[in-house]
Image (tube, rainbow, N blue to C red):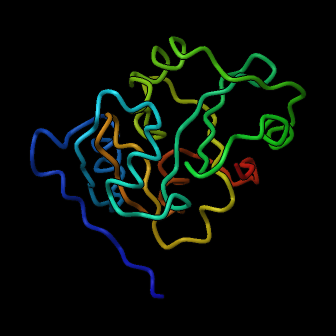
Amino acid sequence: MAKRRRSSTVGSPTASTPATAALVALGIPFETRTYVHDPAETDFGGEAAAALGVAPERVLKTLLAEVDEALIVAVVPVAGLLDLKALAAAIGGKRARMADPALAERKTGYVIGGISPVGQRTALRTVVDGSAAGFDTILVSGGRRGFDVELAPEDLLAATGGTYADIAQAT
């Protein structure tokens, strides 16, 4: 399948978030994807995949972890889990644990369930699961619940300064 380049569709104020503003500023093509978020839903990534009709392997969730006390952004498929040991090893660390949700919100400027790897308040080291490289496009949160952006995995790396590593484990 040929790689499709996406155009920005950030024409309306409702689609503007720090994530989309950062992508536009960087000249990175993307497509916005919206759905109605159910406030009772806590499986945000699963909800996005189902609502948008996209395979869960192509929809990635953004998680924050502490590796040797440094905050790290981990981006993994919603169909899997973050392997904390693999994340620590990927960045040359020893110990990893999930970051406190309040700290994650404060450092990124986004709410849980809407944390985008792009346009965060504090620039953090980012690791994207290597499985993302196998797709022409992937979806990540656009900066709020019910709003994703679709872009090429290489463009996500460019926008975040991230690297690939095998940091996901199957559920």
Measured from the top left, where is residue 20 in percent x and y?
29, 44
49 lies left or right of 125? left
The residue positioned 30% from the left and 47% from the top of the image is 25
Extreme residue toward the left, this view? 12
Give the number of marks.
0
* Nearer to us in this view, 128 or 34: 34
The residue positioned 63% from the left and 35% from the top of the image is 125
Measured from the top left, where is residue 56 in percent x and y?
51, 58
Image vertical order of residue 69 relative to residue 61, above or below: above
User: In which image quadrant can residue 126 be found?
Assistant: top right
The residue positioned 79% from the left and 26% from the top of the image is 96
Extreme residue toward the bottom, this view? 1
Extreme residue toward the front, this view? 40
Measured from the top left, where is residue 70 in percent x and y?
71, 21
Image vertical order of residue 63 relative to residue 147, above or below: above
User: In which image quadrant can residue 15 be found?
Assistant: top left
* Nearer to us in this view, 159 or 71: 71
Measured from the top left, where is residue 106 in percent x and y?
46, 14
89 lies left or right of 2? right
The residue positioned 53% from the left and 20% from the top of the image is 104
